Image (cartoon, grey):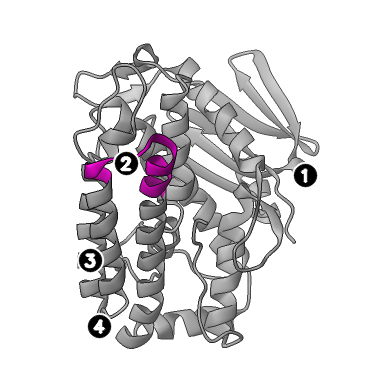
Amino acid sequence: MKKLLNTLYITRQESYLHKERETIVVKQGKEKLGQLPAISISNILCFGQISVSPYLMGYCAEQGIGLSFYTEYGKFLARVQGPQSGNVLLRRAQYRWADDNEKSVSIARLMVAAKISNCRSVLMREVRNHGDNTVLNDAINKLATSLRRVQHAQSVEETMGIEGDAASCYFGVFDSLLKGDGFSFGGRVRRPPTDPVNALLSFAYTLISHECGSALQGVGLDPYVGFLHQDRPGRMSLGQDLLEEFRAPWADRFVLTLINRKQVKQKDFITEASGAVRLTDLARKDFLIAWQERKQVEITHPYLQETVPIGLLPHCQSMLLARHLRGDTEFYPPYYLK
């Protein structure tokens, strides 16, 4: 099984990264902020005004260390990529599947079914922990209907429509899950997020999306050619497909934990002149520390029946998807929350 390495998150503005022997050095002006062995790093994510030396960029590409750049709000900007890894025959099989509606929808249905089931599990967990709730029970029943519908979807467009209806139902009751003082949720707002809850969700989704893209590339798949999300220049469509399985069980539950345990508070957010809301620098650092700790938590994978850290789930699912596209398995087993 693949070893879970560290992800280096650079959030301090005007930082500069360069290579020194076999280490990665982070500086701000003349002050050295940190120096880490490159062998322990799998990904580097830079948020905001971060500079990286060309030599370090080349080194990351050669060593397979992911290097991506985002705005301070988490919007993807660019990714440094070295030679494509993996078997070209696998990627050719992926492209043929993506061009075939019947084959694409066979995978898209499973991914969306997993997403709906995982959303439903989050709501059912709330009911188990805090007693019956009419609003949540109604949403749980509606998601069960969506789950049955998606199993019979005949096209990617129909599958996307069912997914949209289910997401609207789920987020329509998400506010009922919030216990933190002053936090409320009126609906999903993405670009940019205009309230603290949406800011946290968007940040978490961004981090998982990067993990998915890196994992897919690591097993030899093209993260830009998906089955559920259509091709769009600059978008990792297959990475977005895989992300759907992890939104509720990984990102949403993590955000709910931070809020309900009062690990984040209203004072931890800044509202920009544009109306966009983001974490303060200190709060973002605390968020990422908690995120790294969460990635280390071990679970039993429902299909592989192996104990793996949560941070390796994208790799596990990417590996299972590659097996299916190669014809080694009859079905792709998506990640279901148990």
Q: Quadrant of the N terminus?
A: bottom right
Q: Residue at x 61, y 63 (%)?
A: 316
As drawn, 184 above or below 115: above
Residue 165: say if magenta.
no
Extreme residue in the right direction? 21
Q: Residue shown at 53%/87% (left/top)? A: 330
Task: Say which amino acid is labelled 1.
Answer: Ile
Give the distance between the C-alpha atoms of the residues marked 4 and 2, in whole angstroms: 35 Å
Query: Closer to the camera, 158 or 274?
Result: 158
Q: Is residue 249 above or below residue 162?
A: above
Q: Position of residue 60 (x, y in %)?
A: 65, 48
Badge 1 marks a residue whose secondary structure is helix
Task: Please name the residue that numbered disc 4 is placed on.
Answer: 154
Badge 3 marks a residue whose secondary structure is: helix
Cα separation, mark 1 vs mark 3, equals 43 Å
State the extent of the magenta-drawn residues as a range. Answer: 122-136
Asked which quadrant contains residue 239, the reply is bottom left
> Which residue in the protein does label 2 denote?
132
Q: Which amino acid type corresponds to the residue marked 4 in the rendered image? A: Gln
* Rendered position, 135 above or below 290: below
Q: Position of residue 201 (x, y in %)?
A: 37, 38
Q: Which residue is mark 1?
A: 39
Q: Nearer the viewer, mark 1 or mark 4?
A: 4
- Left or right side of 113 for 46: right
For marks 3 and 4, the one nearer the N-term is 4
Disc 1 and disc 2: Cα gap in Å? Answer: 50 Å
